[in-house]
Image (cartoon, grey):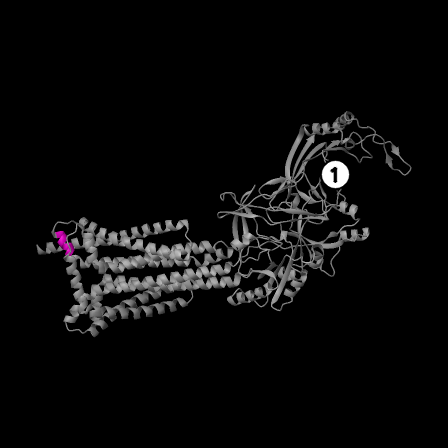
Amino acid sequence: MKQLIFHSLKRKKTTSLLFVIAFLIILVIMPLSSTSLQDAHTQVKTDITYYSRGSYDLLIRPLGSEREIEKELGIVPENYLGFGNGGITLKQWKAIKNRKDIEIAAPVISLGYYTGVNTNMGLVQPEHSTRYLIQHLTTDGVNRYPASKKYACILLESPKTIDGIEKFDSIYNDKKLMNNCTEVAMVPLPTTYNLLVGIDPEQEEALTGISFDNIDEEYPYEGLRAAWKYSTKSKGKVIPVIQLEEGKSAIETAITIDTLDINPAKTKELRVKIQLDDNYLEGKDGNGNVYRKGTVFFSEKFYTEEYRHLVQELLQYPAEKHVDFSANTGSIIQPFNPNAVEIDEAGKVNELQDGKLLQNITMNDVTQYFTSGPLKYEKEGNKLIVKKVGEHDGVPIYRDIQKHGTTLTEALDKDGDVPFIIDPVGDFKIGKRKEKLASSPLGIYQMAPVYYIGNGKDKKVQMQATITPGSFVTSSARGVTNIKSAAAMKGDKPIDAIRVKVAGIKGYTKEAAKKIENIAHDIEKMGLKVTMVAGASPQKMKVDVEGVGLVEESWTTLGAAGSIVGQWNMTNMILAFLFSLVTIIYIMNRMTFWQVNKQQEMLLLYQLGWNKKHILRFSRREISILMFVAWVFSLGVLSGIQQWLHLSNKIYLWQLAITVISIFFLYFTISRKTKKTFNVKMKKKLVHVREKTSNQPHRKSLVPINLQYFYRFIRPPFIQLLLVSTLSSFVYLSLTETVQQTNVTILGEYINLKVNNWHILLIVSSYLLGLFTLVESLASILMTREQEIGIFRSIGWKINHIFKLYMKEIALWTGSSILIGNSISLIIYLSFYPLQSTVWLTIIGSFFGFYLCILLVSAIVINRYLKKELGDTLSLRRKTK
């Protein structure tokens, strides 16, 4: 029997080789695909567990604090604490903090936007008469807006000095320069507004790792303003504040320096022109004080028409030397502590050293502050837009703002006291921001950058908050105070949010999520809004901002981890099912070809005296040898792939399981097909079909007749191609949609990079099995139609005529199969995913691409077979002659 088996395999070497290659593909691709799908699921689960928890788990807010955009889209804009109205009591916070299952409960109290002291900036003293034009600007990173008027400080060489001290006479265009533009060019800095928040130092340090000892509730540090309170016997509460060291202001200063050809003699002419007294000194009194009489300084004529004309004349005076530059003044301005600025002629900005230049300081604005509302996002289709609500000091604002308190002068005039005193007592640093896969919204110190992207073709421009309250870009907290001081300023329900970290959790698992949910339900019973932020991830959102353009913001997608897991689980499950179905159908089809090809051989063995049992054993051994050869080669291929890609050893378990299942399935199918071959009823049915087909009336085209007659050969590849086209289209569509839906978050992007590439194996293997099925089917049909080909040749048909007939048949049934498969793919896709505009292009592209590939392979197989038949016929004729 062994010799007979090997002889049979050798005689059908092409069919045997196709069988070995096909099962080699199955035994390589299926373990790889199964392993990759399993690894993808494990990778997603592991990444979600490790990365998606974030710095805290629950965000607790007062009821009604949710915005419409959050309710509608399930996303939260980056840091919107700047407009908190409170709503949570200190008692509620302490009750949450004291729970045994809570590790951290860090409260946040938004106090509004406060200014530090107003101070000034100056430039180095000139050598000659010089005209300084200085204007402060604030910027959002894209546009620049005036933050002050354009100051003109003109220093003219003086015709006379007082004991060598006064070298210049000063002329300026604004009364704010009265005590600034003297011997040097100095101008006041614009007022900046900085977000101040209250925290619990202990809980905040546990959450962030930053020390807040300076604002300890019981023993806070004291600064210069606390000393001012004691010296003035003020009753106002001292609010200790530590300021963010990295929190600089968005101030630029545009400076023009013109050297003028005005010597002391020319200055004297100008003095005479404006009728100034030329005698600087009248004498000294008994105490040595200098006194004078008459109008000596240009500034004493400030409100006269002559002075205004002189200023205009000097502004138009030609310059001997002209220098323009811009200085990043805000880079060293501290939010709450006074520090004047010095700028040299090269534009370098330095903090003004004591005694070098005159520093003017005023605390007049420290007792008034602003609160701002949230950005008002509007939806137009799939686009978000934000419109301006007005201007503040000439700078566009995008939020409603309210002014609170009064100036220090007004407070002292009204009550003789101030309500509170902001007392800077130190600085804190947070370090460089790092992008995280998980997001915990409402951070208060660092926020994801906002980028201007324009039309998407230009380079991104990082934006920043302007110096006014109401900026589009949300400002981070520039200063923090303790919760006790914050509550004294804000009232009975001061807390805007509590960030909670649950105790006893190391990763975001199902068990951890359940525990977090249970705690959330308990806290909600206190009448608070609780949002699960464990499992949230940053998401990039495009917003059309009036006056700016298209902007990219980082928002927080709530429940991102759960969505990613669910999306990939569903996709992997559907893909695994469809690919398994493709493989099973291939094996069934392969055994149908086997039955057709072995039918005559089995009947011959039966006539020679073999019983069904021996024939069945013969067939099984033949298949076992082919399977063993395929298994050996697949083992070598898998071993090389495993070492190359560093895959786990479980790939061999998958291969063993698939091999065993395939053998049992093949044995079962062989037994069934063998019995079917010897079934008398089947033989009668076959004869009946042929007779029925031959008795049909004559038709103009042979194509439909042939398709009906050879339906048993066509049916297996028809089903196989239908399934392959279904799977290939669906794999691409489902993967594209899964990636698109999960890619909106950074966590999703990270996971997709790791799991996406493996799924290409499913498409490749499906196409290969489909093509093998087609080749085997065509080979079987052509061998069966040898007599038909001979008849066509005898009546004068040429090879190309037969080729065209067969290609018409193939084009019809393969096209129908692929079209149905693509239609089924579309139906399955729409059952799980939303319809996108690109779906139609994908379906059409998949249909034509696979169809053309099938026609090309078919043309090659038929052409080679017909040429071989022609060659065999010619050879036989030569031998006959």
Percent of width and height locating residue 312: 70, 28
Closer to the camera, 591 or 474? 474
Above or below for 684 versus 374: below
* Residue at the image point whose x is 15% and y is 68% from the top: 604
> Residue at (90%, 36%) from the top-left corner?
285
Q: Say which amino acid is labelled 1.
A: Asn
Q: Residues within 10 Å of mark 1 (few under 14, many from 20)?
A: many
Instruction: Please provide the residue range marked out in magenta.
Output: 787-793
- The verdict on residue 91 being magenta is no
The picture places residue 877, in percent across and down from the top left corner, at 11, 54
The image shows residue 460, relative to residue 161, as above or below, that is below
Work out whether residue 874 can be spotted.
Answer: no
The image position of residue 99, as x and y in percent, is: 63, 67
Q: Hey, which quadrant is residue 632 in on the image?
A: bottom left
| Residue that mark 1 sits on | 180
Q: Is residue 279 left or right of residue 795?
A: right
Q: Quadrant of the C terminus?
A: bottom left
Residue 790 falls within the magenta-colored stretch: yes
